[in-house]
Image (cartoon, rainbow, N blue to C red):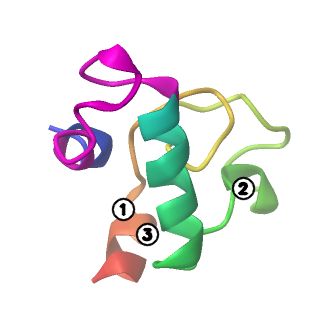
Amino acid sequence: MNFVHHISKVFRGFGGGYFSAITHTMVHELGHGVYKLQHTFAYKQLAETKGKTDNLMDYNGGSFLAHYQWRVMQ
């Protein structure tokens, strides 16, 4: 189970769906604000351009986090 799946339970009422664009945006921004996570394309070894990964911190609507991101959040 991924990070967004867990967090989306908190925001279940937004957007009419179990997981919606507003939920994704909120969780993505929490990643920046609370955990100081950067976009994946800020690290050239992860992605050269935006929208190329299924990572939460990309712009492709993904919901997964890399190991280093989980470590940052500990």
Res. 45 mark: 2
Foreground mark, 3 or 2, reads 3
Q: Are marks 1 and 2 in contact (CB under 8 Å)?
A: no
Residue 42 belongs to the span the image colors magenta: no
Left or right of 58: which side holds 34? left
Q: Amino acid at mark 2?
A: Gln
Label 3 or label 2, whichever comes before in sequence order: 2
Residue at the (20%, 48%) spot, across then down: 10
Q: Amino acid at mark 3?
A: Tyr
Q: Amino acid at mark 1?
A: His
Asked whether 7 or 62 is in front, the reply is: 7
- Give the quadrant of residue 74: bottom left
Q: Which residues are magenta?
A: 6-21
Residue 18 belongs to the span the image colors magenta: yes
Cα distance, mark 1 to mark 2?
14 Å
Res. 67 mark: 1
Is residue 18 shown above or below 64? above
Name the spot of residue 29 as percent of width and height, x first. 57, 59
Name the spot of residue 50 as percent of width and height, x first. 79, 37
- Give the quadrant of residue 47: top right
Q: Are marks 3 and 1 in contact (CB under 8 Å)?
A: yes
Residue at the (26%, 40%) spot, across then down: 8
Q: Which residue is mark 3?
A: 68
Quarter of the picture holding the N terminus: top left
Residue at the (32%, 25%) spot, across then down: 19
